[in-house]
Image (cartoon, rainbow, N blue to C red):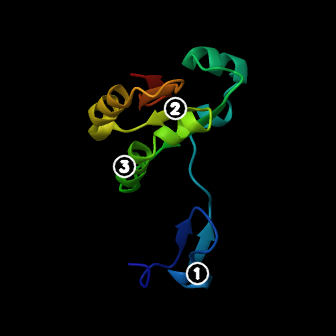
Amino acid sequence: MGKKATKIFVATSGMEKFFQKEKIQITGNPVRESITTNIITQKEAINFFGLDENKKTVLSVGGSLGAQSINEAISKHIHLFAENDLQLIWQTGKPYAKAAKDIVAEKKISGLMILLCKWNMRMLQPI
């Protein structure tokens, strides 16, 4: 498909190995205006998600075909979050939500705050 396209829009640089350099237009990832104009403070977000403000938080958001490998990697190494005193907001996507809940319940890792979330067209919401 890239051979016939006159322009190829990509999120990041380094795509020359896949497409002809003169066809590439770096545009970044599209983001909803409501996200870029949001005025929620860090403290409000910490309170909304029930996080510990003294810990670092990892946000995992996968999409499309990459979501499965991200979810599997987190599942396999979830103990590392507790070992490194991290909190995790894990947006799994609908297909993996039950498996993630089961993994979190099964592991029972002491001191690990994991918040499973779904996307509701406007924001992440805890499930």
Q: Are marks 2 and 1 in contact (CB under 8 Å)?
A: no
Q: Residue sitting at 62 percent across and 61 percent down?
A: 27
Task: Please name the amino acid that badge 3 sits on.
Answer: Glu
Which of the two discs, 3 and 2, labels the residue nearer the N terminus?
A: 3
Left/right placement of residue 116 relative to residue 42 reads left
Residue 95 in picture, x, y percent from top left: 27, 40
- What residue is at 56 percent from the left and 50 percent from the top? 30
Q: Which residue is mark 2?
A: 89
Which sits earlier in the primary sequence, circle 1 or circle 3? 1
Return the residue nearer the eye: 61 or 84. 84
Q: Quadrant of the N terminus?
A: bottom left
Residue 73: x and y, percent? 42, 50
| Real-space CA distance between mark 3 and mark 2, rounded to the nearest whole angstrom | 15 Å
In the picture of the structure, the residue carrying the numbered disc 1 is 16
Amino acid at circle 1: Glu
Looking at the rendering, in which quadrant would you find the C terminus? top left
